């Protein structure tokens, strides 16, 4: 129960902060950052590197991840109820998906090349 409490508390704090400060970031993203900070500080405070705080949260997180598909059912129902809007904006949706996919791939490749360059990694695929 402690793991579930920690996860939900981080999510709640993320929601409160985003809504209070009118931030333009998703509250779940802030909640995950808060969860990571909690896990890091909890282990540092305990003076261990063995992941004691991580162990408390990981069981709940694994269960949530195993059942993640169930969380998409309301989304699917909502899309089916509003199929006219999806049809009306299909072109825009396709363009957004294609452009965001290409941008994601480009940023990922750029980050990989930058990390390879900074780490001095050999064999970056230049054929030499």
Image (tube, helix red, strand yellow):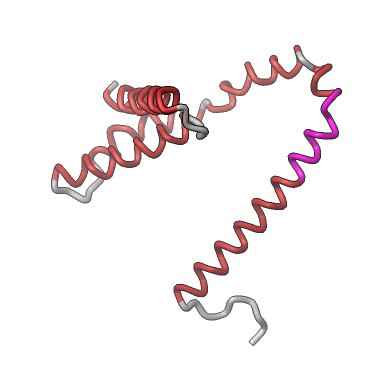
Q: What is the quadrant of the N terminus in the image?
A: top left
Residue appearing at x 21%, y 51% in the figure: 49
Q: In the image, is 51 to the left or to the right of 77?
A: left
Q: In this view, does 95 lie above or below 90?
A: below
Q: Toward which corner of the image does residue 51 lie, by quadrant?
A: top left
Q: Is residue 110 above or below residue 97?
A: below
Q: What is the quadrant of the C terminus in the image?
A: bottom right
Q: Main secondary structure of the magenta part?
A: helix
Residue appearing at x 72%, y 52% in the figure: 102
Residue appearing at x 21%, y 40% in the figure: 42
Quick check: is 41 in the magenta stretch?
no
Give the number of callouts.
0
* The residue stretch that appears in magenta: 88-98
Q: Position of residue 117 (x, y in %)?
A: 51, 74
Give the residue furthest to the bottom: 128
Q: Toward which corner of the image does residue 13 lie, by quadrant?
A: top left
Residue appearing at x 60%, y 63% in the figure: 110
Q: In the image, is 10 to the left or to the right of 114?
A: left
Q: In this view, does 53 lie above or below 7?
A: below
Q: Toward which corner of the image does residue 91 lie, by quadrant?
A: top right
Quick check: is 96 in the magenta stretch?
yes
Q: In the image, is 24 to the left or to the right of 86?
A: left
Q: Position of residue 23 (x, y in %)?
A: 47, 31
Q: Where is residue 20 in the image (x, y as percent from the top left)?
A: 40, 23
Q: Nearer the viewer, residue 22 or 95?
A: 22
Give the residue furthest to the front: 21
């Amino acid at each position: 129960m402690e793991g579930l409490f920690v996860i939900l508390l981080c999510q709640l704090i993320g929601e409160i902060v985003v809504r209070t400060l009118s931030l333009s970031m998703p509250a779940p993203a802030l909640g995950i950052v808060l969860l990571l900070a909690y896990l890091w500080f909890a282990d540092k405070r305990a003076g261990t590197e063995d992941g004691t705080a991580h162990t408390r949260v990981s069981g709940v997180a694994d269960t949530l991840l195993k059942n993640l598909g169930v969380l998409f059912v309301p989304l699917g129902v909502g899309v089916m109820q509003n199929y006219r809007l999806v049809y009306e904006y299909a072109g825009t949706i396709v363009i957004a998906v294609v452009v965001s996919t290409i941008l994601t791939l480009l940023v990922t490749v750029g980050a990989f090349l930058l990390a390879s360059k900074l780490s001095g990694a050999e064999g970056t695929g230049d054929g030499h």
